[in-house]
Amino acid sequence: MDLTAPPDTCSADQYVTKLVRACEQMGYLVHVHEPSTRLTVSLDHGKPYTHETITLRMVGDDLMWCWSWGAPMVPAAQIGEAARMIANVVRG
């Protein structure tokens, strides 16, 4: 799997892998659920209110990261911004 490919050629699995790595580098725990386009990001102490579940899905013609309540966050290629937004929610 080539994680250095231009964003427009990444598969959904590659976007998920990139977001998992970005969140882990920030010190968060990440669990990928089936289907593999859904992941939960949490703090290491695992309290239930310190996690967020993110889904990668199509919104119109765009592949987007979406919050647990379904609202779009950012386009799939914006890994750094998605990780920062998730961190803001998880750490409260």
Image (cartoon, rainbow, N blue to C red):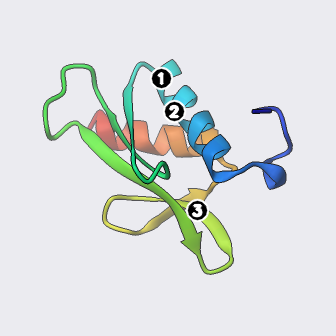
Query: Where is residue 36 shown, x and y percent of the image?
Result: 48, 48
Query: Where is residue 63 shown, x and y percent of the image?
Result: 63, 64
Mark 1 surroundings: few (<14), some (14-19) or many (≥20) residues within 10 A: some
Residue under label 3: 64
Q: From the viewer's perspective, is residue 51 above or below residue 46?
A: below
Distance CA(mark 2)–CA(mark 1) = 6 Å
Q: Quadrant of residue 81?
A: top right
Q: Is residue 37 found left or right of 39 in the rendered image?
A: right
Residue sitting at x 38%, y 68%: 70
Please tell me which of labels 3 and 1 falls first in the chain: 1
What is the three-letter code of the residue carrying label 1? Glu
Distance CA(mark 3)–CA(mark 2) = 15 Å
What is the three-letter code of the residue carrying label 2? Val
Query: Outermost residue, bottom direction?
Result: 60
Residue under label 1: 24
Residue sitting at x 26%, y 20%: 44
Secondary element at image label 1: helix
Disc number for residue 20: 2
Please tell me which of labels 3 and 2 falls first in the chain: 2
Query: Where is residue 24 shown, x and y percent of the image?
Result: 47, 23
Give the quadrant of the N terminus: top right
What is the three-letter code of the residue carrying label 3? Met
Q: Do callouts 2 and 1 mark residues in contact (Cβ within 8 Å)?
A: yes
